[in-house]
């Protein structure tokens, strides 16, 4: 083939791919579906503005209020999928399929990730033809000056990732009308407006290679990943949860799980699963037990299943089950406590929706 012909052929293939993408543009579903998305968006936006309002970017108190509200029986939690994809929007032109995203259970997103952002209630809902999903776009700003133990892991392990978090100006919830739930969530710097409050760049931190560490009082860090702020401080199972995770984590390490299931994504998974902290692993424990039981995990570098030997498998399953059991006890204690508090307190009035408003006209359509 001469160079010109090759060029033409290449161009044709490119054009065909584009046409295929354009051809798959999906028409907006019936009005009822949009109404449902709008209702969910309004409820979530109003809740976020109320529980996670604009605050100092270093305020741990503001973070804690936001976390405990969202982690509870929140509108956000009710509208997330059982596994919701999470990550940054590198470019508005890159499809979700082409984007590396992490698989998160609602506990992880509501308890650790979404609370890192603050909201003023401005949002808009728009149909995204290429994805066939609605976007709920919420204006936001990132709490960049929190203590290191308040982030789920050192986001600064990658300068570009940290920079995008710091400059985030919108949170995008991808609403799937078929599931009537949020299928994916992304933060972006590509929104039309600046962050909802100025975020001065924080002094760059240095990543020392550890996803977790122990502070000088012997506590697992990041604190948010050890259930601090999610379980009550007086939960008698708190220390057992931590100890059970530490033992289980040794088995995960022996099983090579941490070669792949860590934030820097050594295996380049498009749909990463994280297991490197108590909260991350707790949210995935049932899937972990099942995948090991069925010999689907671990894998080798080629992605081929490489079952553990009998002894290692039994040990991982036993320690995993022990972690699962103590988590159940901790959760049960929380539920009992909740019931006690509710029974003791006179009915509190539910506070009304505040602050939610459709994006003002300044917010350009995308
Ligand atoms: C060589 C890399 C690698 C190793 C080692 C590995 N995994 Fe995985 N794991 C993957 C990939 C890849 C996926 C699929 C995610 C995706 O779709 O990209 C996955 C998926 C999973 C899932 C989700 C499965 C589901 O049900 O959907 C769990 C849970 C999991 N791994 C646990 C483990 C455990 C436990 C170990 C250690 C015993 C382990 N993995 C070792 C690469 C690995």
Image: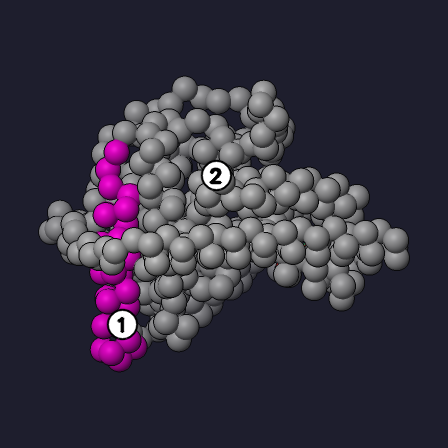
Instruction: Tell me which label, 1 or 2, sits earlier in the chain.
Output: 1
Give the answer, above or below, for where 241 lies relative to 335: above
Residue interval drawn in magenta: 29-55
Please identify the quarter of the rendering in which residue 276 is found.
top right
Whether residue 47 is in magenta: the answer is yes
Which circle marks residue 36 in the picture? 1
Residue at x 56% of width, y 43% of height: 236
Work out whether residue 123 or residue 17 is closer to the camera in this orientation and state it: 123
Instruction: Tell whether 289 sits left or right of 26.
Output: right
Residue on which the image places disc 2: 233
x%, y% of residue 67? 38, 44
Whether residue 181 is visible to the viewer of this picture, yes or no, is: yes
Instruction: Give the structural element (helix, strand or loop) at label 1.
Output: helix
Give the answer, above or below, for where 207 lies relative to 268: above
Asked if the residue under mark 2 is in contact with the one under mark 1, i.e. CB atoms within 8 Å, the reply is no
Disc 2 crowd rating (10 Å Cα; few below 14, some 14-19, many 20+) is few
């Amino acid at each position: 083939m001469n160079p010109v012909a090759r060029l033409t052929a290449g161009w044709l293939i490119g054009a065909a791919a584009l046409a295929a993408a354009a051809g798959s543009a999906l028409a907006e579903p019936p009005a009822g579906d949009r109404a449902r998305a709008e209702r969910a968006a309004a409820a979530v936006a109003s809740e976020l503005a109320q529980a996670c309002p604009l605050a100092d970017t270093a305020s741990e108190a503001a973070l804690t209020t936001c976390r405990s509200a969202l982690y509870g029986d929140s509108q956000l939690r009710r509208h997330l999928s059982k596994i919701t994809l999470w990550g940054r929007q590198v470019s508005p032109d890159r499809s979700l399929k082409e984007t590396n995203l992490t698989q998160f259970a609602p506990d992880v997103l509501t308890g650790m990730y979404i609370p890192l952002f603050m909201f003023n209630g401005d949002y808009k809902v728009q149909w995204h033809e290429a994805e066939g999903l609605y976007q709920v776009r919420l204006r936001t700003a990132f709490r960049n000056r929190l203590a290191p133990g308040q982030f789920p892991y050192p986001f600064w392990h990658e300068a570009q990732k940290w920079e995008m978090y710091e400059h985030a100006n919108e949170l995008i919830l991808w609403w799937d009308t078929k599931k009537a739930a949020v299928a994916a969530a992304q933060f972006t710097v590509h929104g039309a407006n600046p962050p909802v409050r100025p975020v001065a760049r924080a002094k760059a931190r240095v990543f020392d290679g550890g996803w977790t560490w122990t502070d000088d009082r012997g506590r697992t860090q990041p604190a948010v990943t050890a259930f601090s702020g999610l379980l009550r401080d007086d939960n008698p199972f708190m220390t057992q949860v931590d100890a059970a995770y530490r033992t289980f984590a040794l088995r995960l390490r022996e099983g090579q799980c941490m070669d792949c299931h860590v934030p820097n994504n050594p295996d380049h998974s498009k749909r990463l699963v994280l297991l490197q902290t108590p909260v991350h692993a707790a949210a995935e424990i049932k899937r972990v037990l099942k995948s090991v039981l069925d010999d689907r995990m671990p894998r080798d570098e080629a992605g081929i299943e490489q079952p553990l030997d009998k002894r290692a498998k039994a040990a991982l399953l036993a320690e995993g089950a022990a972690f699962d059991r103590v988590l159940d006890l901790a959760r049960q204690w929380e539920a009992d406590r909740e019931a006690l508090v509710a029974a003791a307190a006179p009915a509190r009035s539910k506070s009304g929706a505040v602050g939610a408003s459709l994006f003002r006209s300044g917010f350009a359509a995308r």
